[in-house]
Image (cartoon, rainbow, N blue to C red):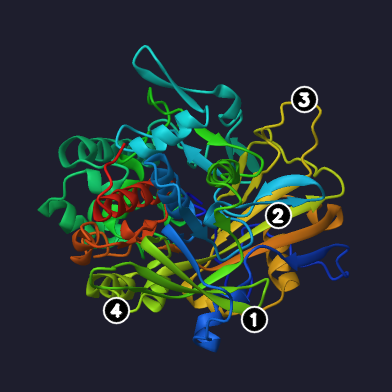
């Protein structure tokens, strides 16, 4: 999942209640499983506190600060970092969970680090200047002869990707296409169309740094699937791959996301390259065993434990008017079991649109309208610890990203892939699923073991010995993991107004872009911090 994707954390898959339909899939084992499963990560009770319990009185001693950042995802961490860099010393951040990171948090299973969400970050392009600055500060990028150069120790090691296709593993994720085949012809034609879109329309990350034209709006007004049909892209292998890409970044397939979003996936970054093209090699990405938590933990550390407060559920936010203008916040302290009021000169509300409208008293009409228009995808991330390495099928050797062709699922990532020991056994796999919106209720009510069994049944089509070699499964569930860029969302009229909000209470989230991507969240946090500084009369450094 790309943050943002990303967040979103940006991966994986869709299961129906009747179970999985995979070519060559094994049925569930009749024997009782010799493994355990449990939920980890997000505390659903905290997230539903306001919905279920309303507003309690503030009984803890009130606190005051200069600027309050509400939400410790990538946008909130970026905003706090920018404010501190600008010389605002009295910055405090309130985070719902015990640790910050949002969709880019990490975990450990059996002492091994692993992601709970977004697990990689592509090298940023020229428009993502906030990400470039962050990575330079963290020592991941440096300038050499006028170009950005990445620290190769943190780039994804080879082999990067493989696809389980027709009973064997093949390199890369595009289904194979024979020379002279209709499939290869469609690959090459799509490659040219994406190249034309990049050159003549313009796409960027963050997306608002590219112009918006009537041609963009026309793409935003239809689904990606409808656009592909109209352009004559019917090859089943190509359509499966494009659905996979959309689920990976957006949490929904080409029938749900806009044509603008489908083209933006390729045109804003690395393009689409047919096999044999000079640029067909996969773009370099940064990744770590714990995923993008490697980054967010360092961002949080720079803020400092004395200013970052975990276990704080924001219940209400309101702006004061008049000569003593400021922001008042009511938050529930999960450890103390009581509410506290906070007063600040200004605040950044770095929460998803649907949460921000609930807690922001007198929220701007533009935010309310955008929240109502933004569908969200539920996600499941599972880390599977093995008792023994899995037997390998024929074909390409084990890779970082391992995907079954034709599946609604998105396969698994080898969480230990960055370990360069030649004899390293693969003992921890991270599987991702972007679920249909209708599965949100089942994600809340069904047991961890039931969801783990679904994953095991699916992955057994790749590794029939998985049930016997599995020790435990830790599952992370996100009820509203990421915004789905459905038709009309990118061009929603509320978006420009929200980027120009005045006053001392600012909103910052990847939802402002309509997709959960790290670059979008980072830009939203930095720009909201700049607006806060202007409202306070503080010059930017």
Residue found 77% across the figure and 45% down from its top: 112
Q: CA distance from mark 2 to mark 3?
A: 23 Å
Q: Are marks 3 and 4 in contact (CB under 8 Å)?
A: no
Q: CA distance from mark 3 to mark 4?
A: 59 Å
Q: CA distance from mark 3 to mark 1?
A: 42 Å
Q: Secondary structure at mark 4?
A: loop
Q: Residues within 10 Å of mark 3 (few under 14, many from 20)?
A: few
Is residue 42 visible to us here?
Answer: yes
**The quarter of the displayed image where residue 253 is located:** bottom left
Query: Which of the two labelled residues, at mark 3 and mark 4, occupies the earlier sequence position?
Result: 4
Query: Which of the two labelled residues, at mark 2 and mark 3, occupies the earlier sequence position?
Result: 2
Query: Which of the two labelled residues, at mark 3 and mark 1, occupies the earlier sequence position?
Result: 3
- Which residue is under mark 2? 383
- Which residue is under mark 4? 362
Q: Are marks 1 and 4 in contact (CB under 8 Å)?
A: no
Left or right of 502? Residue 12 is right
Query: Which of the two labelled residues, at mark 2 and mark 4, occupies the earlier sequence position?
Result: 4
Q: Secondary structure at mark 3?
A: loop
Residue found 63% across the figure and 39% down from its top: 169
Q: Nearer the viewer, residue 47 or 463?
A: 47
Q: Is residue 364 above or below residue 143?
A: below
- Which residue is under mark 1? 445
Residue 211, given in percent of the width and then of the height, sits at 16, 45
Q: CA distance from mark 1 to mark 2?
A: 20 Å
Q: Nearer the viewer, residue 108 or 329?
A: 329
- Which residue is under mark 3? 422
**The quarter of the displayed image where residue 46 is located:** bottom right
Q: Residues within 10 Å of mark 2 (few under 14, many from 20)?
A: many
Residue found 85% across the figure and 66% down from its top: 33
Q: Secondary structure at mark 1?
A: helix
């Amino acid at each position: 999942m790309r943050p943002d994707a990303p967040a979103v954390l940006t991966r994986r898959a869709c299961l129906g209640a009747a179970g999985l339909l995979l070519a060559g899939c094994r049925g569930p084992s009749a024997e009782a499983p010799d493994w355990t499963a449990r939920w980890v990560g997000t505390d659903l009770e905290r997230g539903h506190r306001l919905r279920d319990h309303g507003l309690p009185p503030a009984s803890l001693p009130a606190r005051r600060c200069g600027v309050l950042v509400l939400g410790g995802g990538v946008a909130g961490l970026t905003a706090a970092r920018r404010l501190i860099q600008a010389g605002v010393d009295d910055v405090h951040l309130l985070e719902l969970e015990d640790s910050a990171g949002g969709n880019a948090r990490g975990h450990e299973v059996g002492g091994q680090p692993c992601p709970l969400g977004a697990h990689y970050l592509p090298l940023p392009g020229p428009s993502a200047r906030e990400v470039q600055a962050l990575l330079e500060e963290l020592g991941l990028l440096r300038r050499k002869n006028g170009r950005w150069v990445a620290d190769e120790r943190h780039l994804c090691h080879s082999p990067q990707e493989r696809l389980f296709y027709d009973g064997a593993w093949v390199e890369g994720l595009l289904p194979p296409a024979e020379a002279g085949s209709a499939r290869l012809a469609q690959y090459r034609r799509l490659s040219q169309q994406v190249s034309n879109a990049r050159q003549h329309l313009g796409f960027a990350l963050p997306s608002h740094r590219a112009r918006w034209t009537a041609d963009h709006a026309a793409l935003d007004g239809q689904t990606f699937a409808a656009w592909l049909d109209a352009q004559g892209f019917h090859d089943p292998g190509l359509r499966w791959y494009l659905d996979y890409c959309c689920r990976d970044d957006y949490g929904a397939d080409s029938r749900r996301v806009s044509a603008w979003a489908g083209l933006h996936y390729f045109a804003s970054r690395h393009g689409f390259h047919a096999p044999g093209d000079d640029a067909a090699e996969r773009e370099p990405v940064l990744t770590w065993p714990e995923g993008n938590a490697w980054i967010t933990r360092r961002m949080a550390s720079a803020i400092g434990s004395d200013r970052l407060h975990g276990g704080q559920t924001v219940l209400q936010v309101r702006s004061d008017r008049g000569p003593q203008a400021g922001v008042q916040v009511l938050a529930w302290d999960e450890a103390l079991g009581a509410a506290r009021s906070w007063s600040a000169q200004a605040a950044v509300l770095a929460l998803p649109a649907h949460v921000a409208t609930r807690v922001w008293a007198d929220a701007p009409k533009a935010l309310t309208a955008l929240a109502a228009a933004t569908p969200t995808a539920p996600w499941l991330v599972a880390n599977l610890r093995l008792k023994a390495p899995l037997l390998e099928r024929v074909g390409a050797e084990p890779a970082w990203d391992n995907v079954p062709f034709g599946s609604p699922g998105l396969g698994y990532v080898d969480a230990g892939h960055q370990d360069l020991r030649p004899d390293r056994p693969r003992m921890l796999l991270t599987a991702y699923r972007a679920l249909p919106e209708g599965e949100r209720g089942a994600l809340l009510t069904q047991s961890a073991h039931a969801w783990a069994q679904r994953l095991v049944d699916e992955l057994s089509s790749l590794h029939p010995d998985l049930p016997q070699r599995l020790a435990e499964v830790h599952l992370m569930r996100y009820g509203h993991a990421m915004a789905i860029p459905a038709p009309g969302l990118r061009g929603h009229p509320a978006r420009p107004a929200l980027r120009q909000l005045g006053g001392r209470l600012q909103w910052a989230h990847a939802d402002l872009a309509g997709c959960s991507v790290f670059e979008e969240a980072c830009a939203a946090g930095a720009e909201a911090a700049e607006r806060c500084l202007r409202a306070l009369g503080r010059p930017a450094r």
